[in-house]
Amino acid sequence: MFLLAYILMGLNSFAQQDKAKANRALWTNLGLGFTIADSYDNGTVPFHIKGIGTVAAPSATYRWKRYETQLEFRSFNTTLAYPSGTGTNLNLNYGFLYRFHDSQSNRWHQWAGGDLEGFFDIRQIPALQNASSNLSAFSTLGAVWKVEFDFAFNKDKTHNWLTAYGKVGLPIVGVAFRPDFSYVSNGVGMVSSWELLTAEHHIFTKFFPGCNTTLGLSLNLKNGNRIALDYRWDYLTTGKKDIYRYDNAFHSANLTFMFNIFRR
């Protein structure tokens, strides 16, 4: 991580324009972090499942005029504490934002828009025997709001070295693919591991309670590269009280290196 930060700062010879003059920018991003997972999946096991793990989050961000779009892939690999096992969570998100407000000082910026998200939860818990392998999948459409504050300007007030930001996303409606068994799955006669993983599932559409929030700080280099540090909380639930209830929360600390590959 320190080597990447050194390379980013060393690339300053390729700087083109300050942020205030930029009209378009494209970043390829590499995010790395640690996470704490807390889940309650009553369709497979009737108590909380907790664990710790790592996060990898490659993404791409494109800004032009007053618009921003981002495509992000996040992979969570979690070691579960009790019952012991492993969790693999895959998240694919596409978001679109419009900058609808700038303060008179041009330091505060507000963005609003929406996102489309796909989330896969795969768990391997040997203690559940026939239900040791289980899969849940969700696809949601949500609303997003983001605020930024630029500070630590240079003497000419043409470049800010730091930006603090906060982001809130609310899933609104979506589709869920969930196991309809409680504790035990009928694995007899299954011809493949994929069939076993997806057996006895059902699909339903509903309004989803949930939220994802981000609080962070980015270091803005003069060549357009950035280094961001943030805390993120992702929460999704089906809101059900019966055996299909599903609650999942990730608390993660992330370090992201943003490589500017186009700026004009």
Image (spheres, rainbow, N blue to C red):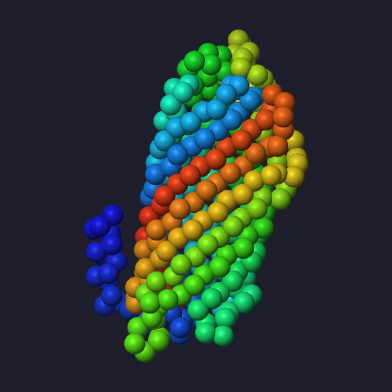
Res 93 seen here = yes
Residue 197 location in percent, x, y?
A: 57, 24
- Which residue reaches farthest top? 188
Tell me if residue 51 comes above or below residue 99 in the rendering.
Answer: above
Residue 134 location in percent, x, y?
A: 57, 25
Residue at the location (48% across, 37% down)?
A: 37
Q: Choose top left, top right, bottom left or bottom right for residue 15.
A: bottom left
The quadrant in which the N terminus is found is bottom left
Res 64 seen here = no
Residue at the location (58% across, 44% down)?
A: 235
Tell me if residue 236 comes above or below residue 67 in the rendering.
Answer: above
Left or right for 202, reference 193: right
The quadrant in which the C terminus is found is bottom left
Residue at the location (67% across, 50% down)?
A: 171
Residue 42 location in percent, x, y?
A: 63, 25
Tell me if residue 173 comes above or below residue 176 in the rendering.
Answer: below
Left or right for 195, reference 164: right
* Residue situated in front as seen by the camera: 232 or 116: 232
* Residue situated in front as seen by the camera: 1 or 165: 165
Left or right for 213, reference 216: right
Count of marks, rendered view = 0
Q: Choose top left, top right, bottom left or bottom right for residue 202.
A: top right
Residue 164 location in percent, x, y?
A: 46, 67
Tell me if residue 56 comes above or below residue 260 in the rendering.
Answer: above
Residue at the location (51% across, 42% down)?
A: 250
